Image (cartoon, grey):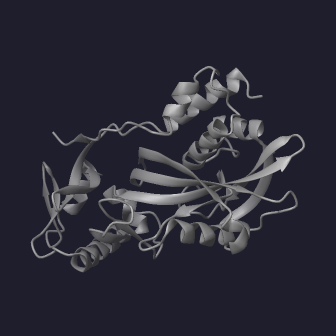
């Protein structure tokens, strides 16, 4: 049973953590579509790069000649390296994301992952709830991120979670991350059940996070013990669903769950009935999974 106090704290913490952007943004135009969004300060950082960008009040566009995917991607790589050299990006990952009209569509360009939020492109990730059926109810595996991670170091996380690189399928990303972060064999990872998506659009220190997360549930054997292989996870703990609710309600201290993972846990609690539909604030919690965001363009 999840108490009303925990539900209220959960709603307050996630409403604040997932708050929609408040600044004014300029679109990064490609083929008359907004491929990304930059606030005024970041748009100003691009203005001197006149061999790549044309920066105006109504948006940022690529200069003439950068009219195809390889040309845009190469120019953006040069721009991203300049930004990284001046300390404007999180640590370099050597992994590219695709910016495209829709997931899986032909991309407008590819971009180094560390620059994705700077340019406000729409990114995609896959997260997995590691679930175990026990005599006392359902329990969930929670991971702790390494203190050396570029984003959210040392915070609690889902059992499996990671970005989907350019050209990678959801299934391939899930299988890779499950092995690296929890030691889940491919045959077991392939049993993960798709459970829909959740969305985030929020301001972060490194830019605008616009992300869709493909959520999965993976029912694990009672004797399975996760063990990370890549050093990005330093701890795993198995907690009952009410304890998972208390963790995502916690917005401060060493046992704080990342906002992304907290949203995925909330989604799981709602789907599996751990939060009853007549609980106080149920509809407000449910709405957090589908934020209505209208970015304010520059005036």
Q: Identify the residue at horizontal 55%, vertical 48% (top origin).
A: 260
Residue in front for this viewpoint, 65 or 133? 133
Q: Is residue 13 visible?
A: yes
Residue in front for this viewpoint, 238 or 279? 279
Q: Identify the residue at horizontal 56%, vertical 68% (top origin).
A: 171
Q: Can you tell which quarter of the image residue 297 is in?
A: top left
Q: Identify the residue at horizontal 53%, vertical 49% (top origin).
A: 196
Q: Which image quarter is the C terminus in?
A: top left
Residue 66 x/y as whole percent: 16, 74
Residue 131 x/y as whole percent: 74, 52
From this view, report whether residue 113 is shown above or below residue 56: below
Residue 156 x/y as whole percent: 67, 51
Left or right, 259 with reference to 87: right
From this view, report whether residue 148 is shown above or below residue 269: below
Q: Can you tell which quarter of the image residue 241 is in?
A: top right
Q: Is residue 87 visible?
A: no
Left or right, 156 with reference to 99: right
Residue 224 x/y as whole percent: 83, 62
Residue in front for this viewpoint, 224 or 91? 224
Q: Residue furthest left?
A: 64
Q: Residue furthest right?
A: 135
Q: Which image quarter is the N terminus in?
A: top right
From this view, report whether residue 110 is shown above or below residue 192: below
């Amino acid at each position: 049973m999840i108490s009303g106090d925990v539900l209220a704290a959960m709603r307050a913490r996630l409403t604040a953590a997932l708050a929609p952007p408040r600044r004014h943004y300029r679109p990064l135009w490609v083929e008359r579509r907004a491929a990304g969004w930059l606030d005024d300060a970041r748009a100003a950082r691009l203005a001197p790069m006149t061999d790549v960008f044309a920066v105006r009040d109504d948006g940022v566009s690529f200069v003439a000649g950068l009219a195809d995917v390889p040309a845009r991607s190469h120019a953006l790589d040069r721009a991203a390296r300049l930004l990284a050299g001046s300390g404007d990006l999180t640590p370099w990952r050597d992994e590219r994301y695709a910016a495209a009209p829709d997931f899986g569509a032909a991309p407008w360009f590819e971009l180094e992952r560390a620059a994705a939020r700077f340019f406000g492109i729409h990114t995609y990730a896959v997260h997995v709830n590691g679930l175990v059926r026990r005599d006392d109810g359902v329990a969930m595996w929670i991971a702790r991120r390494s203190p050396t991670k570029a984003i959210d170091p040392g915070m609690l996380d889902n059992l499996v979670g990671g970005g989907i690189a350019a050209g990678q399928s959801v299934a391939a990303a899930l299988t890779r991350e499950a092995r690296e972060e929890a030691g889940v064999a491919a045959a077991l990872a392939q049993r993960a059940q798709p459970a829909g998506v959740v969305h985030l659009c929020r301001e972060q220190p490194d830019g605008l996070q616009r992300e869709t997360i493909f959520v999965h549930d993976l029912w694990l054997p009672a004797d399975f013990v996760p063990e990370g292989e890549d050093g990005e996870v330093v701890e795993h703990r198995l907690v009952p669903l009410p304890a998972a609710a208390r963790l995502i309600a916690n917005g401060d201290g060493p046992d704080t769950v990342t906002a992304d993972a907290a949203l995925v846990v909330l989604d799981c609690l709602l789907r599996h009935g751990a939060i009853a539909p007549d609980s106080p604030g149920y509809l407000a919690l449910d709405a957090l999974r589908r934020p209505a965001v209208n970015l304010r363009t520059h005036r």
